[in-house]
Amino acid sequence: MPAVLRVALPVPLPTLFDYLPPATGGAVQPGSRVLVPFGRGQAVGVVVATGVEATVGTGKLKRALRRLDDEPLLDAELMQTLAWAADYWLGAPGEAYANALPLALREAKPLPPLGEACWSLSTAGRSALDAGSRRGASHALLAELAAGPLGAAELDACLPGWRAAARRLLAAGLVERGERTASHTVTTRTAPALSGEQQQAVAAVAGDLGRYQPFLLDGVTGSGKTEVYLALIERVLVQGRQALLLVPEIGLAPQTLRRLRERLGVAVEVIHSNLAEGERARAWLRARSGEAKVILGTRSAVFTPLPQAGLVIVDEEHDGAYKQQEGFRYHARDLAVVRARALGVPVLLGSGTPSLESLANVEAGRYRALHLRARPGAVRPPTVQIVDMRAQRLDHGLSPTLLAAVAETVARGEQALVFKNRRGYAPVLLCHACGWHADCPRCERPLTLHAGRRMLVCHHCDHHARLPTTCPACGATELKPLGQGTERLEEALAARFPDIPVLRIDRETTRRRDAFEHLLDGLRDEAKPAILVGTQMLAKGHDLPHLTLVAIAGVDEGLLSLDFRAGERLAQQLVQVAGRAGRAAKPGRVLLQTHHPDHPLLRQLLAQGYATAAQSLLAERRQSLLPPYAHQVLLRAEATQRAAVDAFLAEACAALPPEHGLQVAGPMPAPMPLRAGRQRGQLLLEATNRRDLHAALRPWAAQLARLPAARKVRWSLDVDPIDLY
């Protein structure tokens, strides 16, 4: 009986595939990539096992075409963790293994060199610099390279937006691209003295270096959690080990990267989806070789190989961005804990507003809690004031109290943030004559007006429509925007404060690479008055020393939501946004506009803080048997016809094992039953015991693809969903 390879292929099927080994090229080991025939084409897969017994006769098996790696790309720990993850999140195993590899490594090409790409001046470039023949970004790049070659990471730090200039200069022969060994940065800033609380936190985690122990670092915003991270990473580096630091958003990576490089005497590798695929693959391979000692990344960086692991850190652990919402639906925070256990290292979860799941793990004794209650360097925590919007005359949704506070702030030469978690100009365009409003034909939800582009846009499916000049229903010309988005607030504030810069920071204004960091750099470096208008992009971890006022334009949507997680999310968002104010020497102030000033959650949050509000929310969840005191799996289905969705969900429900002991809700339409022209439905399964839930669902999940109605729908399983949307 010939040896058989069991291979994971990047397809959404709940199975592995058997192949005969390649005819030439030597033995293949688990964790290596192979090129195999698949369907009418070819695919790159990861070998999961060798020498296995074939599930069909070997005469029916195809032969792998060739081995791509002389030695495994994925080590035993990562292979074991990925197998666990595919089983736990009920995902297609091939998609789980594919997630662990950067895109450039999912192709049948040689591995990229480990060296770092770098740019240097050519002879012509030095002459152009001396002659001053280039202007703007091109001149700035030539000037930066005058002292010697620089790598991409160094240029990212000192000259955001340099890439377009590099392409121009490369084409003109003024710069040259080469390769060098990964550079080591030089420490340029000494560590500040840690507070007593910070020292205690560092000592607690450092005492467990070398063994698995989860910690929850619960620190109020501005309390110096990053300094704790840096001190611990320094200790790990002294031991010659690696540290992995995860952040939830790409926008947080440059700020964190700068602080790491200012303090650590080693190169810091960055892994996130905004990188060029070649750079991402080289960073991943340098981590795999052990050359990279500090790895900073977003959700996907949790799959980075760590052969010399010393510490795993997850910053802003409560953030929903850590949950993958398409394909293989893993949660990076939870997977980081699993990896730390497999690697035998401590894992530190940090947040100013910890998730209820992590607080429940502290309560159960699974995590150790560390607390930072003081803000080093700040005069005092920001003062918080509720502004009752009832019976007030509002100017584009802004109360007189809010506008007066903004005026006082900029008059003192300080900066103010007006927060509104809704982009665009207005969420509804209404005909004043007949009541018609612009709806998305594919979602049956209101289209958002984007006045700058003169477009109506659906924020659910990205459908675009031209802005009509007359009402399509009655022909009237009185089309009125209702409600406010960041674009409308920017316009209103710019009109009211014509001499003050008004900067809007949302997805529209930060589409260009490095635009977000470029906007924030100007605010950090200059103590000048400015007004920021922004969405939740500004709520997370950004340190703006001259920002003293945060005005939250409205929170009522969160107070009135039917989602059982809405209270937790609103509390976290309010505390995180409020934490942007008064982070340096100047005191901060927070204004909170609402039509429900007596809402119990708001009052408790203001009077007693997030910790007490979170305990109240946990008590409600415990009483209602909701997560984290119960466990959920959501089966979603969508199709162009409602009948196909209903038929599949009915078959799926009937296929549940007898006496499964689960709570079943549905089949039922999704909260948003139509999206992008597709009908949507779902089935929610719950149990108080996680093991019982998975025991019942593993065989059921394997059956779903074989149901007759499955061919007519797109379906997915979401284990531990963070929303039921």
Image: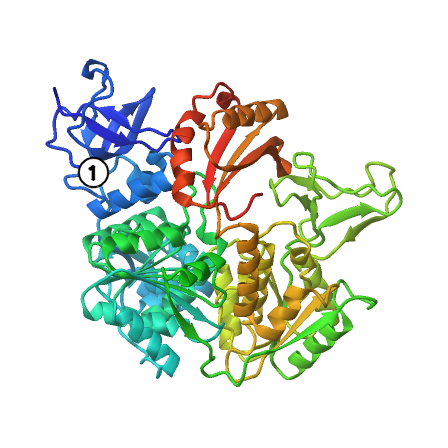
Query: From this viewpoint, is residue 143 visible?
Result: no
Query: Dot 1, how many residues are within 10 Å of its Cα: few (below 14), some (14-19), or many (20+)?
Result: many
Q: Position of residue 378 (x, y in %)?
A: 50, 83
Residue furthest left in the image: 26
At label 1, the amino acid type is Ser
Left or right placement of residue 682 versus residue 315 in this view: right
The relative height of residue 237 versus residue 40 in the rendered view (above or below) is below
Q: Please state if 180 lies on the left or on the right of 591 as rendered.
A: left
Residue 107 vs residue 588, the one in the foreground: 588
Name the quadrant containing residue 235.
bottom left
Between 351 and 279, the one nearer to me in the picture = 351
Q: Which residue bears the numbered disc 1?
A: 32
Q: Is residue 653 above or below residue 498?
A: above
> What kind of element bears circle 1?
loop
Residue drawn at point x = 24 percent, y = 17 percent? 56
For the point 55% across and 84% down, the residue is 586
Residue in the foreground of this view, choosing between 274 and 329: 329
Q: Is residue 517 above or below residue 673?
A: below
Q: Is residue 312 visible?
A: yes
Q: Quadrant of the C terminus?
A: top right
User: In which quadrant will I find the N terminus?
Assistant: top left
**Residue drawn 67% across and 61% down?**
555
